[in-house]
Image: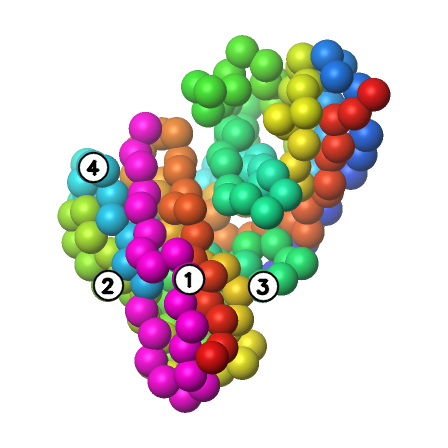
């Protein structure tokens, strides 16, 4: 199985400041069709996960443009340009390049 | 906006079988894969498996021997059955839609399943 390792596990951030979360894969996520099926999810307290970024860097419908995704191969990053109070929650990377689909262990974003 | 809603047994006895149904809005077409994902209390996410519009399934090998999924497009529903439940299976169970060559895009609100006698 593909193991996704996120760092940091906890990220205290000042409002208005940038934040970034790293996700490292145990194997390349480059699919045979040329796409990299690495997505980022946000889970606010008491809510289901919500898709933010898919295929490495595509923002999902309705996601603010302060969220962006980047990376290649086995190293990926979710960046938030200016953190807002509503961004508090747990962020997961997830891959659908190889079965079984897997998730990172999650990074808790909190406000300082 | 796609809507998914889980329903089913919230309390299951050890060794018994869990049965859940997910009702979704809209049509089921060939680019859709219907998934189950679970999250133990305070922990991360685990993919259980999917069923395609064609009826083809794929299960997580760690759960494969205990899982069965089915799809009823006439009712816009798909289901999960998981046998031989133990306390380790206590979790919030989510249903979710995956679009081929994209990602899991929409999730249900989840249903808490507790395994206890």
Residue A50 image position (x, y, % from top left): 53, 59
> Closer to the camera, A106 or A52?
A106
Task: Specify start and end residues of the magenta stretch as a single range.
Answer: A1-20
B87 within the magenta span: no
Marks 2 and 3: same chain? Answer: yes
Question: How far apart are the alpha carbons under marks 2 and 1?
Answer: 20 Å
Marks 4 and 3: same chain? Answer: yes
Q: Quadrant of the N terminus of chain B?
A: bottom right
Q: Is residue A85 visible?
A: yes
Q: Nearer the viewer, mark 3 or mark 1?
A: 1
The residue lying at 78 percent from left, 38 percent from top is: B7
Pointer 1 residue: A10
Pointer 4 residue: A27
Pointer 3 residue: A44
Pointer 2 residue: A70
Q: Do tag 2 and tag 3 residues touch (Cβ < 8 Å)?
A: no
Which chain letter goes with mark 4? A
Which tag, 2 or 3, sits closer to the chain's start? 3
Question: How far apart are the alpha carbons under marks 4 and 3?
Answer: 29 Å
Secondary structure type for disc 3: loop
- Is residue B108 left or right of B103 when viewed as pictured? right
Which tag, 4 or 3, sits closer to the chain's start? 4
Circle 1 crowding by C-alpha within 10 Å: few under 14, some 14–19, many from 20: some
Which chain letter goes with mark 3? A
């Amino acid at each position: 199985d593909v193991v996704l390792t996120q760092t940091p596990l906890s990220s205290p951030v000042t409002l208005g400041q940038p934040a970034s979360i790293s996700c490292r894969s145990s194997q390349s996520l480059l699919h045979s069709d040329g796409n990299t099926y690495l997505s980022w999810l946000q889970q606010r307290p008491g809510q289901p996960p919500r898709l933010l970024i898919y295929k490495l860097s595509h923002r999902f419908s309705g996601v603010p443009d302060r969220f962006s995704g980047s990376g290649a191969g086995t190293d990926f990053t979710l960046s938030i340009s200016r953190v807002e109070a509503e961004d508090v929650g747990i962020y997961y990377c997830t891959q659908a390049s190889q079965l079984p689909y897997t998730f990172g262990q999650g990074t808790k974003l909190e406000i300082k | 906006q796609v809507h998914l809603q889980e329903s089913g047994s919230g309390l299951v006895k050890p060794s018994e079988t869990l049965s859940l149904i997910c009702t979704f809005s809209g049509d089921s077409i060939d680019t859709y894969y219907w998934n189950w994902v679970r999250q133990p209390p305070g922990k991360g996410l685990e993919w259980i498996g999917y069923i395609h519009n064609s009826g083809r399934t794929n299960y997580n090998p760690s759960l494969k021997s205990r899982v069965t999924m089915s799809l009823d497009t006439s009712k816009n529903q798909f289901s999960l059955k998981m046998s031989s439940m133990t306390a380790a299976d206590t979790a919030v169970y989510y249903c979710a839609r995956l679009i081929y060559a994209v990602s899991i895009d929409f999730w249900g609100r989840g249903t808490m399943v507790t395994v206890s006698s």
